[in-house]
Amino acid sequence: VFKLYIDTVFSFFFLFDFSFYAFLSSSSLCFRSQGQFLKLRCFLESSQGNKEAMNPNPVSNGFVNLLLTEEEKGKIEEVRKLVGPLPEKLSSFCSDDAVLRYLRARNWHVKKAAKMLKETLKWRLQYKPEEICWEEIADEAETGKIYRSSCVDKHGRPVLVMRPSVENSKSVKGQIRYLVYCMENAVQNLPPGEEQMVWMIDFSGYSLANVSLRTTRETAHILQEHYPERLSFAILYNPPKFFEPFWMVAKPFLEPKTRNKVKFVYSDDPNTKQIMEENFDMDKIETAFGGNDDSGFNINKHSERMKEDDKKRLAALEDNPSASLESLSFLSVSDSARPGSEDVSEDDEHQPRRNGSIP
């Protein structure tokens, strides 16, 4: 049961930094003995110290003031050298901001960050996330289980609304493809100079029956490996009672930046409802989250918005020449490494996982 709780909780926290992900994915092992637990604590405290020494810039709600130190600039250039020259289509993934996200995700370890970035480039060349269009994933979107809200937070960052209780598909491939589409759409709508988005997770009607461990593993793999440091903060709205006690156990072992990304909000608690007012214009927030907008999710209106975004994105793609795996020898990868390349239903969760998926 404890393992199931962990898998459930980390499925909502997978955009956090590497130390937090490591904590959640290995908790079932680390809690076997006090000695192992203390080792984990020492590791997390060491990671926190390294990160704070690297960059003293203040962090609030995951919003980072990007005043780079000379050491950080040097590490960005080291990563670029290890990755090597890239075609125009992929050059944006080696911008300062992009490389910085991978360095943070790998605790400023240059070789590990470069390897992680290369794996993302491989994945993007094969999976082609930027080419996924609304017509391909429209069926997955019908219930509003994930969608980009029409509102933004007070920093102008896009908001992804998630409702795990209205999952309408058993196809792992379809669910992952739709998740990737939503992530790409949110990234497409980031304001200039911003690298992160916001999540609002509505737990109304939620139960453990909504949890698919196979989908959770695939989701965590895709987001942690290919969208690192993309989450500014997450609102957990009316979560199950067991979520917060687990979080309180984990919280002391996490650095402040990570802790600040998780915000529990309850509709019957005025103190936590204030979190919404501090971060959003409540006139534009859905009533389901305590706001004043009673329009709710409308698949037809949402469909039109997504189609317009698709047109803009595809028009931009036409201006960039296509890259291929053959033209980038160090990025060659077999089809078997492509995440989500096989269509598997949730009923097949007992089958062995592919190499590279989360243990």
Image: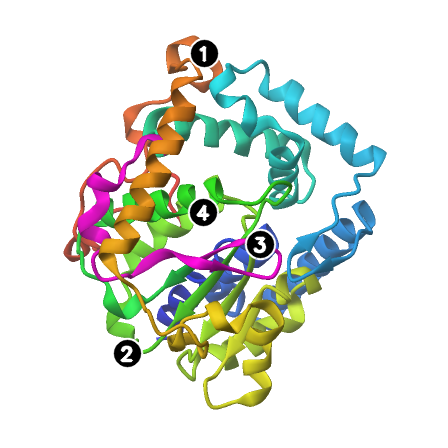
- Circle 4: element type: helix
Query: Looking at the picture, how far across and down is residue 54, in whole percent?
Result: 80, 45
**What is the x, y in percent for residue 193?**
64, 41
Disc 2: which residue: 205
Task: Answer with mark 2 or mark 1, whichever residue precedes in sequence.
Answer: 2
- Look at the image and tell me whether residue 353 can be seen: no
Q: Which residue is disc 4 drawn over?
A: 186
Depth check, mark 3 against mark 2: the one in front is 3
Which numbered tag is attached to residue 329?
1
Cα separation between marks 4 and 2: 25 Å
Q: Nearer the viewer, mark 1 or mark 3?
A: 3
Most foreground residue, 340 or 280:
280
Check contact, mark 3 vs mark 4: CB within 8 A.
no
Vertical side of 275 occupied by 74: above or below: above
Q: Earlier in the sequence, mark 3 or mark 2?
A: 3
* Contact flag, marks 1 and 4 (Cβ < 8 Å): no
Q: Which mark is residue 156?
A: 3
Question: Is 267 in the magenta?
Answer: no
Q: Identity of the amino acid at label 4?
A: Ala
Q: CA distance from mark 1 to mark 4?
A: 31 Å
Confirm whether the magenta stretch covers residue 139. yes
Q: Is residue 94 visible?
A: yes
Q: Quadrant of residue 281?
A: bottom right
- Judge from the rendering whether residue 50 lies leftward or rightward of residue 304; answer left or right: right
Q: Which amino acid, by three-letter code, is at mark 3?
A: Gly
Front-lying residue, 104 or 281: 281
User: Seen from this angle, which residue lies furthest top?
Assistant: 327
Highlighted magenta segment, given as a residue range? 130-159
* Cα gap from disc 1 to disc 3, whole angstroms: 39 Å
* Real-space Cα separation, disc 3 to disc 4, in angstroms: 12 Å
